[in-house]
Image (spheres, helix red, strand yellow):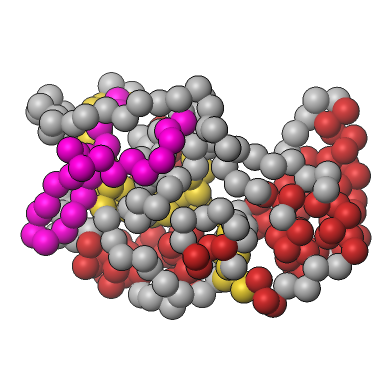
Amino acid sequence: MAIWYEGNRNNVKNERQQDGITYYIRGVHEVDGVRYERYAVKTHFIGRGEDYVEVLRQYVLPLYQPGDVVTLGEKVISMCQGNIVSIDEVHVGFWAKFLSKFAYRSATGTGLSEPHKLQLTIDLKGLPLVLWASFCSAVGKVFGKRGVFFEILGRDIAGIDGFYPESMFETYRTTAVLSSSEPEKVCADIYEKLGISCVLVDANDIDVEVLGKSPDLADVSDENLAERIRDNPAGQDDELTPFILVRDIGDQPAQEYEPLVAVDAPKH
């Protein structure tokens, strides 16, 4: 079930400081009888080519305790890996302009209704496959089935983010961020170098998908890990909190927290 919040979630009353790091309390969420308190770690705007290990060393390691699990936003890891495309590199053709008129616009973004994004899909997968996926998608909708387009084209297309004219960050207005490369390797690398248990996720206000996890979490189900951040504590606005530190607090009292007010659906 989707949980919607409007605007920036960094309520000043939930702001905390430790060892020069700013983080925000995101409340307690119980999963399988375990009480997890979540802390959204604030960073600078992480740009293309930065070293994600060093970023985590700077912002997360000072707060980390054994037993914690840190969720990593896929967009930031992709930026570090340089998996991005500038809008200037995408030349929109007839089919992208035409098909984008029929694309579904979700509540969390423009999706493939943005012609540049659809053209990028054509560039990556080829026009024949995109046309076939579009046809199958149209048939699927007749029978009440959604998601056929991405089932055919794959998760790497579904994971494309960016080209949002309304984004709070100028970079994402003119840049598309592709899916991260080797998510399991990313998590293993972080665990080996920093000792941080981590999960790479594609999360928004609709769903949370686990893409990779560090080897020490092999026996923890993806469903359990995703449920710990089901309400998307990283946020959808300009929070600059791509890393969520999830801590089992047992029977200990939670930190003082002013709850956010959920809404029935986003206004846009």
Which of the 4 image quarters holds residue 233? Answer: top left
Residue 226, placed above or below residue 181: above
Number of residue marks: 0
Question: Which part of the image, by quadrant, shows the C terminus?
Answer: top right
Q: State the extent of the magenta-drawn residues as a range.
A: 4-30
Residue 261, placed above or below residue 65: above
User: Would residue 41 be counted in the magenta stretch?
Assistant: no
Examine the rendering and report whether any part of residue 158 can be seen: yes
Which of the 4 image quarters holds residue 160? Answer: bottom right
Name the residue rendered at 57%, 63% in the picture: 173
Q: Report the front residue among 167 and 199.
A: 167
Name the residue rendered at 38%, 68% in the picture: 46
Name the residue rendered at 39%, 52% in the picture: 238
User: Horizontal and vertical percent for residue 148?
Assistant: 78, 40
Q: Report the front residue among 195 and 148.
A: 148
User: Horizontal and vertical percent for residue 231?
Assistant: 41, 33
User: Would residue 17 be counted in the magenta stretch?
Assistant: yes
Name the residue rendered at 67%, 49% in the picture: 111
User: Horizontal and vertical percent for residue 176?
Assistant: 60, 65
Examine the rendering and report whether any part of residue 216 can be seen: no
Give the side of residue 174 with respect to residue 94, left or right: left
User: Horizontal and vertical percent for residue 188?
Assistant: 37, 62
Q: Report the front residue among 151 and 175.
A: 175
Give the side of residue 89 with respect to residue 256, left or right: right
Give the side of residue 108 with respect to residue 77, left or right: right
